Amino acid sequence: ELVAFDSIGVELGDSNYVFGMPRALEMTSGGNIVVGDMVRMEMLMYSPEGTFLRSGGSQGEGPGEYAAPTGISATPDGGILVADAMGGKLIIYDSLLECTGEMTGFEPYPPEEPVLLQNGSLVGSRMSFDRESGTMTRHLARWQSGEVEPSLVYMRRESEFNQEDPGRAYRESALSF
């Protein structure tokens, strides 16, 4: 039986606690909770007790800005890594949600929900679509530090794309663990 013992968020009231569409959630190495909100287009940081600490990031194309954040993960130094699928980059924020760098050049997209390892390499999944064969493929892979192509593919899942049920290929190629 699942029982809620705490929550963050309200329907009306303090805007720091009103969510539009939370897309990603991560706990930093310092114990803070970061919520990536697709409607608000910002990252919101809370203490372990649920107290709002700060927000960071915004919609755009410049440094530290994103078009569609698809996932976040904690970095070893207490910051977060944000995957921006539409912007084609990964954005690195420090523990104060200040942008400290970006990784670009991923084709067609950066890894979704990446995990930054101690040695600087990444593990994540990436989806691709082949129009010629009509297939959608998702890879679980590792990228070496600074590289835009995976150095190792752990798993590959492929599904035929059907225009009458486009969600089917997405579900069939999804990786869950």
Image: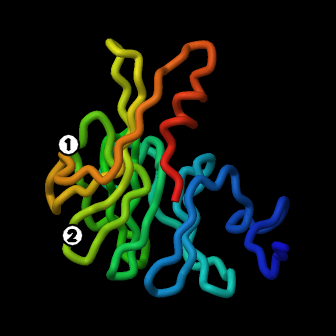
Element at badge 1?
loop
Q: Nearer the viewer, residue 54 or 33?
A: 33
Q: Position of residue 128 (x, y in %)?
A: 36, 32
**Quarter of the figure with the N terminus:** bottom right
- The kind of residue tagged 2 is Gly
Question: How many residues crowd around disc 1 within 10 Å: few (fewer than 14), some, or many (20 or more)?
Answer: some
- Label 2 sits on residue: 120
Identify the residue shown where x is 42% and y is 72%. Answer: 74
Task: Work out whether residue 151 or residue 90 is closer to the camera in this orientation and state it.
Answer: 151
Q: Is residue 27 left or right of residue 40?
A: left
Which residue is painted at 44% across and 83% down in the image?
29
User: At 58% across and 79% down in the image, what residue appears?
Assistant: 53
Badge 1 is on which residue?
A: 105
> In the figure, residue 102 lies in which quadrant?
bottom left
Image coords of residue 126 (percent x, y): 36, 44
Residue at image position (54%, 81%) is 32
Q: Give the vertical position of 23 relative to 53 (above or below).
A: above
Do labels 2 and 1 touch, CB within 8 Å? no
Q: Residues within 10 Å of mark 2 (few under 14, many from 20)?
A: few
For the residue pair 173 and 150, the one nearer the viewer reads as: 173
Q: Examine the image and state in which quarter residue 123 appears.
A: bottom left
Sequence-wise, which precedes: disc 2 or disc 1?
Answer: 1
The image shows residue 168 at horizontal and vertical percentages of 59, 28
What's under tag 1, amino acid-wise? Gly
Mark seen at residue 16: none
Count of all numbered marks drawn on residues in the image: 2
